Image: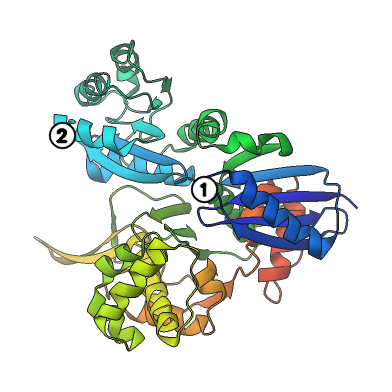
């Protein structure tokens, strides 16, 4: 037996998965409430005890972890134009597993600087201008940030002609400064890979240590990446497969958490109608977005604000005040599970609302515009209407008695202009396999894929690529 322990320090639960690489097989899994506010090792040790009770004592060859505890990787991004370098910076940060808590465009004002200081980001990504294009904006923003009194790292990934001046402007400030290639070197061309590697490297070397993870570092072989980055790795592997084993093709996934809702799409997203024109920055084939205001516990109020209390009350068949009361109870006690029938109905309505909003924000939109030659349909973002496979995870979905009903209602609520999936086969990641397999893919991609196919595979998908 070649056992490996895979650990996900989530914002609400610490989840463990034990895998035997020799068989290969999943030996067992366990979870316990994350204790990031006190000592994160308490929750880990409790989950370890639960796992040992079901699987016995195991001498693991390696213990690997990912983390989104203590707020995850919080980033602020600054760009020149919201729809171009601003969006490029966002996509780069999301793809690296970050939670973007603020986005700014154009020149930073004194009010913007105050807002950034109060947000206390883990990293700030400073972008702006294509290579050889506008330099003044990004240099001015670097000068403004040099006086904010903060100490968070700043990654400069804008016009390469301005890199040296930006670095010089930040000399003597409390900010560690890192220079990366431009995230948008040419108009409408995204170059996210280099800056994403830098973000992950900073996460490992600096951010994890600052979030109280040192208490468990001695028992781990390494915290390899933020949890969302691990999930994205797993989904990309599951979709595309390896040289030996076929993947499942294009898919979408939703991780409905207590604080945030993450949506992933591994799909081209080209217009389904050849007469539709694409507008804006081309999006990555493997895309992630995170809704920091939408969640089932810490961010339950955000779901109500986004959907409306009356609409959620109609879904749950309860009075609107019951929605507000239950959401407040869930927010004040994130470990609380719905007990009464009314709480169960409210929990289901919140899950539907969160799924509806997160999908709408992730997918592209279709808009009719009028030109001198007549009306033209214009697409912004990804067209996911033809995506037929959806993977779902998160406690509210995993333990839902009618998962199909939740998905169908959330999809039926979509505006016709939203390019969300129309009909999907919904599969549940009931064992929280995705984050674990994302970690495992860094050690053994073939085993990680085969274990995922055992859980999610459909007839004919498991086989050698022709």
Tell me, yes or no, if residue 109 can be seen here.
Answer: no
Residue 88 drawn above or below residue 17: above
Residue 440 position in % (x across, y down):
71, 49
Q: CA distance from mark 1 to mark 2?
A: 29 Å
Mark 1 and mark 2 in contact? Answer it, CB < 8 Å.
no
Residue 326 drawn above or below residue 394: below
SS at badge 1: loop
Residue ID for mark 2: 111
User: In the current view of this chain or complex, which residue is farthest to the front?
Assistant: 38
Residue 38 position in % (x across, y down):
53, 44
Residue in front for this viewpoint, 276 or 6: 6
Q: Quadrant of residue 183?
A: top left
Identify the residue at horizontal 58%, vertical 64% (top origin). 249
Q: Is residue 430 left or right of residue 92?
A: right
Residue in front for this viewpoint, 255 or 13: 13
Q: Quadrant of residue 76?
A: top left
Mark 2 crowd level (few <14, some 14–19, many ≥20, 10 Å Cα): few
Residue in front for this viewpoint, 11 or 463: 11
Residue 150 position in % (x across, y down):
32, 25
User: In the current view of this chain or complex, which residue is farthest to the bottom?
Assistant: 317
Identify the residue at horizontal 21%, vertical 32% (top origin). 114
Tell me, yes or no, if residue 32 can be seen here.
Answer: yes
Mark 1 crowd level (few <14, some 14–19, many ≥20, 10 Å Cα): many
Total numbered labels:
2
Residue 68, numbered circle: 1
Q: Earlier in the sequence, mark 1 or mark 2?
A: 1
SS at badge 2: helix
Q: Is residue 376 left or right of residue 12?
A: left
Work out which quarter of the rendered image holds the C terminus and state it. bottom right
């Amino acid at each position: 037996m070649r056992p490996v322990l895979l650990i996900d320090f989530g914002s609400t639960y610490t989840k463990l998965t034990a895998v035997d690489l020799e068989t290969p097989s999943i030996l067992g899994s366990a979870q316990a409430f994350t204790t990031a506010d006190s000592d994160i090792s308490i929750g880990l040790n409790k989950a370890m005890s639960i796992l040992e009770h079901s699987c016995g004592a195991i001498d693991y060859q390696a213990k690997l972890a990912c983390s989104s505890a203590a707020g995850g990787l919080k980033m602020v991004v600054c760009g020149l134009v919201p729809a171009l370098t601003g969006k490029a910076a966002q996509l780069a940060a999301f793809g690296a597993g970050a939670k973007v808590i603020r986005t700014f465009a154009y020149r930073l004002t004194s009010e913007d600087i105050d807002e950034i200081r109060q947000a206390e980001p883990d990293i700030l990504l400073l972008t702006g201008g294509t290579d050889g294009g506008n330099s003044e904006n990004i240099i001015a923003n670097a000068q403004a940030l040099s006086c904010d009194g903060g100490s968070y790292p700043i990654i400069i990934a804008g016009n390469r002609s301005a890199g040296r001046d930006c670095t010089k402007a930040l000399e003597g400030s409390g900010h560690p400064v890192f220079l990366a290639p431009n995230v948008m070197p040419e108009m409408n061309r995204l170059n996210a890979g280099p800056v994403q590697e830098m973000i992950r490297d900073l996460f490992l070397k600096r951010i994890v240590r600052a979030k109280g993870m040192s208490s468990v570092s001695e028992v781990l072989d390494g915290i390899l990446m933020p949890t969302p980055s691990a999930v994205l790795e797993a989904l990309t592997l599951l979709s595309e497969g390896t040289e030996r084993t076929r993947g499942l093709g294009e898919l979408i996934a939703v991780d409905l958490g207590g604080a945030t809702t993450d949506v992933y799409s591994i799909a081209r997203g080209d217009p389904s109608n050849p007469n539709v024109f694409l507008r804006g920055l081309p999006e990555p084939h493997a895309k992630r977005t995170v809704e920091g205001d939408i969640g089932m516990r810490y961010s339950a109020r955000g779901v109500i604000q986004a959907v409306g209390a009356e609409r959620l009350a109609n879904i749950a068949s309860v009075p609107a005040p019951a929605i507000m009361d239950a959401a407040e109870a869930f927010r004040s006690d994130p470990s609380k599970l719905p007990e009464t029938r009314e709480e169960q109905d409210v929990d289901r309505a919140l899950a539907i609302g969160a799924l509806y909003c997160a999908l709408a924000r992730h997918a592209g939109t279709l808009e009719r515009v009028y030109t001198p030659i007549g009306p033209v349909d214009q697409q912004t973002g990804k067209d996911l209407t033809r995506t037929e496979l959806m993977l779902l995870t998160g406690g509210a979905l995993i333990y839902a008695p009618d998962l199909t009903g939740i998905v169908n209602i959330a999809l039926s609520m979509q505006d016709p202009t939203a390019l969300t999936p129309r009909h999907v086969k919904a599969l549940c990641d009931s064992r929280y396999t995705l984050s674990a397999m994302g970690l495992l893919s860094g050690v053994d991609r073939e085993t990680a894929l085969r274990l995922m196919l055992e859980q999610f595979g459909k007839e004919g998908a498991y086989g050698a690529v022709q």
